[in-house]
Amino acid sequence: MASFSLFCNSRLSGSTHIAAACSDYACTKPGKGMSSIQAGLRCSWNNERSSCGLSSHRAFWPCFHMKFLHGCVCPEPRAVSSTFMSFCFATSGLQTDEAMGLTLRELCADKVPPLLLDRAEELGFKHPTRVQLEALPLLLSERDCILHSQTGSGKTLTYLLPVLAKISPRRAAVQAIVVVPTRELGMQIARVARKLGGRGFELDLQKRKSSVSIMTLLDGGMSTRQKKWLKAEPPQLIVGTLGCICRMIETKNLKVNAVATIIVDEVDTSLHSATQKLLEKLLAVYTLPDQRQTIFASATIAQHHRFLQDCIQRKWAKANLVHVHSQPAEKMPSNILHHYVLCSSEQKLEALHAVLCSDAPHAAFIFVNELSEKAKTAGSKPSVTAVHDYICKELIGVSANQEWDVLLLEEDTNVDERSATFTKLGGRCLLIATDLAARGLDVPEVTHVYNFDLPTAASYIHRAGRTARRPLKSEICTVTSFISSKELFIINRLENELSCKFSEFKFSLNTHEHWHPGVDSVPPCTADIPSQSSMTICNDKG
Ligand SMILES: Nc1ncnc2c1ncn2[C@@H]1O[C@H](COP(=O)(O)OP(=O)(O)OP(=O)(O)O)[C@@H](O)[C@H]1O
């Protein structure tokens, strides 16, 4: 038996909503724990306080067994279920979700085929990450959802499991679409989907075909063979860029009448004037929200309350769209250290070389800003290429780390080279890239990220997020930005906007050996911020 307290503004509606919220959330918990949670629910009033007792099955309600009886102000009765959940996680005092002991299998029991769960376990997904814990029950009960959580927190598995579980492998029709901003992210998501649900477990226990066929529709990569395949034997899952998917629908190569789920990954990248029109067509014209489940995902969604309302008003999603905001106080993983190096623009390349030699990262991403349109028209050499060439010249063959695979990724690289670069990612690689590589790419070996040029705050989050990608571990990773003294104010701004602390790496150009950090092993300040979790809910009444 465990209990918690909620403070509400209004007695009557508060008590009703708490009861409704608890049973609503209990209903989203699959399996045998559910009935005992509902049975044990009771509400009573005590000086403006509604106290709910929950007795539950141990396996399904582990967080309540560890800490309970906390107060939580509920500002809006309708938001009570979000408060309820955020409260549970924020006050549970748990460091990792693994510590809660709940397995992915228990969380998804009865809603995800055992073969799919077996495969997830084989791939190392045994315990859910925080966002999986919060969102999977909702997604598995068919709710439309905005998944808003840190980079590397496991959003891909969060939406792929319910999608693959819902697809009927014996029906030759496109049943789900994942929209991605770049071809590299598309290739990566298709790879994860194939590992989970693609060829490999062809037959289920009743000896029926149970693998899902997956196809990518990525810019620049549509062959006649693919178009024929789309028509003759449609795949069940499509992973593609918005432009490519819309083109295929308009040219009637892709039929969407059987689509039951659409996921828009990195959704904030689709909200610019050019792409938003295409997104509008896909979500509100070619397909209808009432006939499908809609999932949006990103680590950065500016003005998320407004985004949620807009989605409902524009009929991009159903009116009961839920915003799952996992750990909102921590914009970035707390195991990332943030450093900056002060140097003039002429010294930058040398400084980068020196830091690389000093850090000797296992694998790293080096981000360089794209050239301005003006510079491009003037025929200037992209600085990303210049950095790549310099690194190759200086590092390869002379350094002790000559086994690094130095790779280049930028917009102007042709499709085949981009695919080749993507397949080489992993192991001991140094990728020099523009922001093309900032979104979603998952190379768990990356321990260091370098900002040769400073990005915007949102881009900083995504670039930094290419490291620290083992959600249930806390190895320390580093992001180093190279700035001139004139750019120091930007660092201050980033500190405020991102709630993180930067420390200076001091360095002398003549003596690379004497590199030393300004402050030794500064713990990231986000570690001091109390862990929180919140979730906003919007129903028919808004
Ligand atoms: N339950 C889990 N247990 C262990 N590892 C996991 C689990 N879920 C996901 N991962 C791993 O965590 C890493 C990050 O996952 P993923 O790429 O889905 O993050 P993300 O939240 O989509 O990040 P981004 O916002 O940067 O795209 C991947 O290497 C993935 O394999």
Image (cartoon, grey):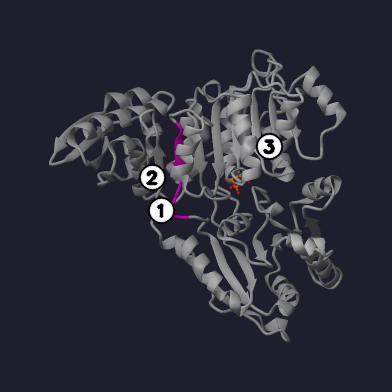
Q: Secondary structure beneath disc 3?
A: helix
Q: Earlier in the sequence, mark 2 or mark 3?
A: 2
Mark 3 lies on residue: 242
Q: Which residue is mark 1?
A: 531
127 lies left or right of 534: right
Q: State the image coordinates of residue 381 (x, y, percent, origin top left).
A: 83, 65
Q: Amino acid at mark 1?
A: Ser
Is there any visible trace of residue 160 in the rendered image? no
Span highlighted in magenta in the image: 321-330
Q: In the rendered structure, which amino acid carries the disc numbered 3? A: Leu
Residue 509 locus on image (x, y percent) = 71, 84
Q: Secondary structure at mark 2?
A: helix
Give whichever of 133, 135 is nearer the camera: 135
Left or right side of 402 for 458: left
Pointers 2 and 3 in contact (C-beta within 8 Å) = no
Dominant SS of magenta comes to loop
- Looking at the rendering, which quadrant does residue 55 occupy? top left
**On screen, residue 418 above or below 123:** below
Which is nearer the N-term, disc 3 or disc 1? 3
**Residue holding disc 2:** 89
Instruction: Kindly check if marks 2 and 1 are in contact, taking CB atoms under 8 A apart as contact.
Output: yes
**Location of ligand 1 given as a quarter of the image:** top right
Q: Reading the chain from its start, which is encountered first: label 2 or label 1? A: 2
Q: Residue 362: where, in percent of width, then height?
A: 70, 61
